[in-house]
Structure formats: structure tokens, C-alpha cells
Image (cartoon, rainbow, N blue to C red):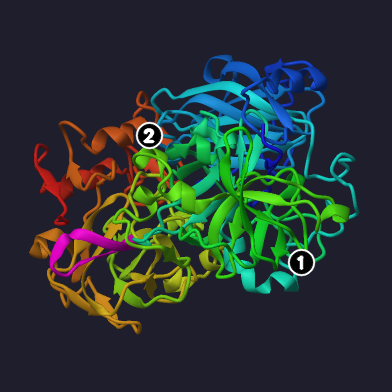
């Protein structure tokens, strides 16, 4: 085991974005539960910490400062949980896991498969903090899933099942029992007031670090299910396309990558501070390259960090020239991020029996402590030249004991092929010696689109406006729904959210629903270049999430673009030709014939003098059909329960084609009757949108 490793703990909150949740809350959240009946539970009994540490820390075990232990907790949630019917349709299933003595718990699933509309929440026993909702969009390629930590020694898993849903699969495999916490009162960690591990540390946001904030935003933590964690560095590549490559120490690696959780920006917001946000997390990765004799792994996170994380992709230098000065950024012993500086040239050495080529350095401000394996070692040009694998100090030995960083230059070509060296991933052409960092959130060119469309389902000819039943009934989500539906966003699109004040605006500007706007290649309309989820108002105008502005596409230069608009249960439309867009937007009205549409007039429904998107695409597949395979009538019946055709479902659902907040199969104002007119009243005809 190396002498350095990172210890990673996560504090979740009500505003948590851990593993990118997709909205919603647990049943009765914020109020007393309607039922006080005890839930079924699994009590694993207390942990013998000494025995657990001894058993886990066997020869050949991964390195790390241990903060907890993984415990088997085999539970088939849907078979063993307590089921309850929900008012208005659907069911909820709950099960509690207990590990007495834990200060925090995390949960790992070995099977996580949800039907459309299903959501999972995990919350602490006293119902103060929850994670989720997690949906189909959170499923990992290998079918597994994992959560961040929640406080206390018991957590409840809640599955919300929509009416008529197909069977899901939720199988818990284990939990991580943590005997240390970030919630305060941890004598093992509170060595100095403010959780400072040592008074000679520098918080990474102190004035001394002002010129290193980009590199600070490239330094990550990741937690593994067995109760260990390490630092890593988000690296740029010569394509500068934001591929989320992360360099870590190989001695931290273990084969549970799909359940690793990466934490961004765990740092104090002030120079003197003891805690930091732990809400910005991503789940899962794959290993791209590994070299045992360089003690490195190159991992790729399963999805890029969203813009809200403010992530930075660090630059690098593989020349092998000794760094003359520079810095290291680390999370020592689970503390908020620290930065340490050296101002004398690093020297070459080797460490351990493997004789790993390393840079050796001495600090003049700050130190390195246990808990920093994989932390970045930057040179005077703020480029990564190594990652730490050993060496630690106290304040008294800061200038006399060295630290050791595995050389980036040796690992560049250290192996025999892509699986054991860095260059194939970071510079496939192997033509670049030094590369600066990449900030995907820097000021970029942008174009704006001001559009007007009408949805046929809620359109009211008498007023020339759409009805806002979903909003009036408090059913519109604050986060865009399309990612959860499986729609693949492009560019900076995806994850857009708004606030209640925007939804509360009355009158013709009242929000009706979310839509997606696409910009497509002027030479190839089948190629989507950028997307944005946006808000549609009663008067047909599409606005950004502030409820006022045109829809802005960052990173897109002024040019001509095909413009398409999609809705979750109406057929999409697209301009017939490329339209000029600039930073300043002018109105493009798709409702009055002033913009020629792909597919001509047949691509929209003429209601009076207004052209509307055709309703009826209940399964969001770009087609409307009344009978046959993948028809849109059956989902309406399934949504109301599939047996009693007169039943009504209340909620935000794709099958609500008139968007009044109710799904009906029969009776006045039912949704089934909107499908057949779209097909020309021909039951066997299939109508598709004109989007290539």
C-alpha cells in the first residue's frame, strides 16, 4: 500500500445534484407520513471496526485511507419491500437498511432497471436529506448503480411506480458503512477548529491560490464502495472536446468502476472554512489505460460534467524537463481542498520496489498528507507533470521531508500500446509535447433563437392561445423532462431547470410546457449540432429558462441553421431551409406560414388560421398511429391502469395529449380521441414527422 490515499465522503442535501437526479420528491416529503406502520428492514448489526479494517487491509488490497467498510446487504426491494397504493394512481414500495453505529451510509445496487416513469429515492431515517429521483436515465451500462452518502446508520429506499408500469428490477447488493463523517463532531478528523488537518495548510480558495483556480477545478475526489477513495485530475486532450479523462494512482484502482462516485468542487467557499458543498457528483467510469510500474490509471467518466459544475480540463507537459516551481492540490484526510507550493526545482528519483520514476520536491507553503494519492503535481506553467503516490509531512517537517509524484513523461510512452500508456488517449497523433488546459465554460460565441409554435393538443381556437392546465395544477417539472425520456442532447443542452417564479407568471406569458429546440447543419439537416430545452408559453413563444430571453446556444457561431422544435407528445417540425441566426434574435413564427416547413403544410395541423404541431405522439417516437405495433392508443390505456377504461390518471404524463393534467381513455376530454384525427381518421395509417 502506498503512503498516500484520498478519503472521500459526500454530504447530500435537498438541492443535491448527485448522480444527476431527475426531479421529484419522496412521498409525503416535508410532512408527516400518512402511514406510521413500520417498514420491513434489514439490520446488519454493529461493525467491529478493528476486525473490519484488518480483514479489508490484506496484502494486495487497494490503497487508501479507509473511512468505512462495504457490507453485504442482499435485498430484492420489489419483493421484500412494503407496497402501498398511491392516491391518484400508481404504487410506492419502501424498505429500510440499518447498520448500527454508522455515521453515514451509501447504497450499492447490483441490478437497477426501471420502467418509464419510475423513480427511486433514498433518504435518511429522520427524513431530513434525500437523494434522487433516479430514473431510467440513471441506469449504468452494466445495470449497476450506487448512491452518495446519507447521514446516520439507517436509510430508506423508496420506489415510486407509475400506473400500468412494466416490472422493474431493484436489487441491493451492499452498503458502505462509514465510521467517519463530514457532519461535524468527528473527533478523528476535527484535529483543529474548522476541520483543518494541519494549521500550515492553505485552503484552495485562499488569496495565495488566486492564480490556480482553473487547476483547482480540475482536481477531483472519487469514492469507491469498499470505503476508500482517492484524488484524480480531469485532463485535457488535443481534440479539446471535453472527453472526461481522469488520471489516478493505480494503487487506488479496484474493479468496481461503475459504482465509483466522482465529486467536483469539494472545497470551502472561503479562505477560512471547514466545510464545502458535496452536491456535484457523477457516477461510473471505465478504465482506458494502466501501467503498474508507473502507478497510474487513466479513467473515463461515463458522462461529461454539466456546465453547472464549472469543471476545468488540466493541461500537461510530457517533455520530462524538471519543474522549477509549482503546486499540488489535494483533499487531505477528507478535508476540503488544499493547495501546497514548491519554489525549488524538482529532482528525479525512484520509489518503492517497483522503482517508479518520480519527481521529488519540497514544499515552502503547505504540505502533503495521507489522503492525496493521485493528486495532481503542476509545474510553473500550471501544467500537470505528475501525480502523487507517496511522501507526507507535518507542519514541522514541511521543508525537510520530500513528496513523490509519478512522472507524467514516463507514463506517456511507458507501455507498449493504448492499454498501458497515456498518449493514445490524450494525443492520438503524438505530435504535442505540452498542452494548455481547456475551459468548456469560458466565454464562447453564441446565437439566439426567438421562436413561436403552437401545440395542437392544448390549443384553444377561440382565444388563439394554448391552455395551461399542467401549470395551473402545479404539475410542470422545474427540470427539463427530455433527458429522462432518453432524448440525446447535443452541445450544452440537457439538464436545464427553471424556478417557481417563472412558472407563476400569469396571462399569455404563462408557461405551458417544456420543448426542445435543435440547431442542425446547414449542409446536412440530419446532423444535430446543438440542442436546448426551453419553455413554451401560452402565446406560442419559446423562451429560455428565465421565462423571458430568447433561447441561447453557447459555442455556436453566427451562421445559417436548420431549426427544429420537438415536444414530448406532439410531432416535431423543422424549417424547410437553413435560417440565419446571430447573437441578437429576430422572431421566427412557425404558426402563420411565414417560415417554410420541411414536409410542407402537412407537417402541421391547421386550426382556423393557426398552424399547430400534430398531437398524438404518446410514446415520443416521432410517429402517430392508432393501431399496430408501437401505437399511441395503448399507452393511454396503460397509463389509466389498463383494465378500467373509465379510470383517470392525474399527473405529468406523455399520454396526456391535451395537456390538462389528466389522462383519460374515454369520456369527455379524453386523450385517445386526439390520436385518430392526426392520422386522417384512418386507423391503420402511420403519420411521421418530417425530421430526418
Could you say whether the residue bearing mark 2 is in a helix, strand or loop? helix
| Residue 524 within the segment the image draws in magenta | yes
Residue 140 in which image quadrant: top left
Q: Which mark is residue 639?
A: 2
Magenta part of the chain? 516-532
Could you say whether the residue bearing mark 1 is in a helix, strand or loop? loop
In the image, is residue 434 above or below residue 373? below
The residue at 16%/53% (across/down) is: 689
The residue at 54%/51% (across/down) is: 407
Which residue position is annotated with label 1? 270
598 horizontally vs 285: left or right: left
- Give the class, few, some or many, for how many residues have Cα within 10 Å of label 2's Cα (few <14, many ≥20): many
486 horizontally vs 506: left or right: left
For marks 1 and 2, the one nearer the N-term is 1
Whole-percent x, y for residue 3 in the image: 71, 38
75 horizontally vs 553: left or right: right
Picture quarter with the C terminus: bottom left
Whole-percent x, y for residue 134 in the image: 51, 39
The residue at 41%/75% (across/down) is: 444
The residue at 46%/55% (across/down) is: 495
Amino acid at each position: 500500500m502506498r503512503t498516500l490515499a484520498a478519503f472521500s465522503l459526500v454530504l447530500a442535501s435537498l438541492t443535491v445534484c448527485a448522480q444527476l437526479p431527475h426531479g421529484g420528491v419522496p412521498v409525503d416529503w416535508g410532512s408527516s407520513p400518512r402511514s406510521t406502520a413500520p417498514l420491513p428492514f434489514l439490520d446488519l448489526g454493529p461493525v467491529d471496526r478493528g476486525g473490519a479494517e484488518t480483514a479489508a487491509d490484506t496484502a494486495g488490497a487497494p490503497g487508501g485511507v479507509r473511512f468505512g467498510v462495504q457490507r453485504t446487504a442482499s435485498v430484492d426491494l420489489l419483493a421484500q419491500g412494503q407496497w402501498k397504493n398511491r392516491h391518484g394512481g400508481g404504487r410506492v414500495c419502501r424498505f429500510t437498511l440499518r447498520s448500527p453505529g454508522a455515521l453515514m451510509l451509501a447504497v450499492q445496487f447490483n441490478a437497477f432497471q426501471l420502467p418509464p416513469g419510475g423513480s427511486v429515492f433514498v433518504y435518511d431515517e429522520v427524513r431530513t436529506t434525500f437523494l434522487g429521483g433516479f430514473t431510467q436515465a440513471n441506469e449504468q451500462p452494466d445495470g449497476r448503480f450506487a448512491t452518495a452518502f446519507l447521514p446516520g446508520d439507517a436509510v430508506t429506499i423508496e420506489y415510486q411506480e407509475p400506473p400500468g408500469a412494466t416490472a422493474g428490477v431493484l436489487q441491493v447488493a451492499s452498503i458502505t458503512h462509514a465510521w467517519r463523517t463530514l457532519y461535524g463532531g468527528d473527533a478523528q478528523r476535527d484535529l483543529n477548529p474548522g476541520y483543518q488537518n494541519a494549521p500550515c495548510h492553505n485552503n484552495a480558495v485562499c488569496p495565495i491560490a488566486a492564480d490556480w483556480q482553473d487547476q483547482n477545478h480540475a482536481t477531483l475526489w472519487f469514492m469507491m464502495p469498499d470505503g476508500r477513495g482517492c484524488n484524480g485530475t480531469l485532463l485535457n486532450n488535443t481534440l479539446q472536446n471535453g472527453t472526461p479523462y481522469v488520471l489516478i494512482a493505480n494503487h487506488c484502482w479496484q474493479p468496481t468502476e461503475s459504482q465509483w462516485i466522482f465529486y467536483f468542487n469539494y472545497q470551502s467557499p472561503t479562505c477560512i472554512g471547514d466545510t464545502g458543498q458535496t452536491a456535484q457528483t457523477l457516477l461510473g467510469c471505465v478504465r482506458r489505460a494502466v501501467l503498474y510500474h508507473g502507478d497510474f490509471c487513466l479513467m473515463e467518466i461515463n458522462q461529461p460534467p454539466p456546465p453547472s459544475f464549472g469543471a476545468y480540463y488540466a493541461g500537461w507537459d510530457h517533455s520530462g524537463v524538471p519543474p522549477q516551481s509549482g503546486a499540488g492540490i489535494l483533499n487531505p484526510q477528507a478535508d476540503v481542498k488544499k493547495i501546497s507550493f514548491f519554489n525549488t526545482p524538482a529532482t528525479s528519483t525512484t520509489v518503492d520496489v517497483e522503482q517508479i520514476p518520480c519527481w521529488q520536491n519540497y514544499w515552502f507553503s503547505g504540505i502533503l498528507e495521507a489522503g492525496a494519492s493521485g493528486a495532481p503535481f503542476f509545474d510553473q506553467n500550471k501544467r500537470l507533470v505528475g501525480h502523487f503516490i507517496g511522501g507526507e509531512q507535518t507542519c514541522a517537517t514541511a521543508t525537510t521531508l520530500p513528496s513523490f509524484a509519478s512522472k507524467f513523461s514516463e507514463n506517456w510512452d511507458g507501455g507498449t500500446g493504448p492499454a498501458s500508456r497515456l498518449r493514445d488517449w490524450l494525443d492520438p497523433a503524438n505530435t504535442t509535447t505540452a498542452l494548455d488546459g481547456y475551459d468548456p465554460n469560458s466565454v464562447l460565441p453564441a446565437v439566439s433563437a426567438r421562436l413561436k409554435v403552437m401545440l395542437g393538443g392544448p390549443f384553444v381556437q377561440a382565444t388563439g392561445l394554448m391552455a395551461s392546465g399542467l401549470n395551473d395544477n402545479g404539475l410542470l417539472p422545474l427540470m427539463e423532462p427530455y433527458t429522462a425520456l432518453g432524448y440525446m442532447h447535443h452541445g450544452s443542452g440537457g439538464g436545464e431547470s427553471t424556478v417557481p417564479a417563472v412558472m407563476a407568471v400569469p396571462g399569455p406569458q404563462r408557461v405551458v410546457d417544456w420543448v426542445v429546440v435543435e440547431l442542425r447543419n446547414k449542409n446536412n439537416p440530419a446532423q444535430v449540432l446543438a440542442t436546448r430545452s426551453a419553455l413554451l408559453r401560452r402565446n406560442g413563444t419559446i423562451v429560455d429558462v428565465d421565462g423571458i430571453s430568447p433561447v441561447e446556444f453557447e459555442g455556436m457561431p453566427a451562421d445559417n441553421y436548420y431549426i427544429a422544435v420537438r415536444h414530448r407528445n406532439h410531432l416535431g417540425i423543422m424549417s424547410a431551409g437553413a435560417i440565419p441566426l446571430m447573437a441578437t434574435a429576430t422572431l421566427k413564427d412557425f404558426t402563420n406560414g411565414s417560415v417554410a416547413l420541411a414536409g410542407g403544410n402537412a407537417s402541421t395541423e391547421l386550426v382556423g388560421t393557426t398552424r399547430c404541431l400534430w398531437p398524438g405522439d404518446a410514446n415520443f417516437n416521432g410517429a402517430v398511429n392508432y393501431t399496430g405495433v408501437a401505437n399511441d392508443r395503448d399507452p393511454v390505456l396503460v397509463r389509466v391502469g389498463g383494465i378500467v377504461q373509465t379510470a383517470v390518471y392525474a399527473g405529468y404524463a406523455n399520454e396526456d395529449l391535451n395537456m390538462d393534467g389528466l389522462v383519460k381513455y374515454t369520456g369527455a376530454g379524453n386523450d385517445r380521441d386526439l390520436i385518430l384525427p392526426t392520422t386522417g381518421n384512418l386507423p391503420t395509417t402511420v403519420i411521421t414527422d418530417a425530421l430526418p
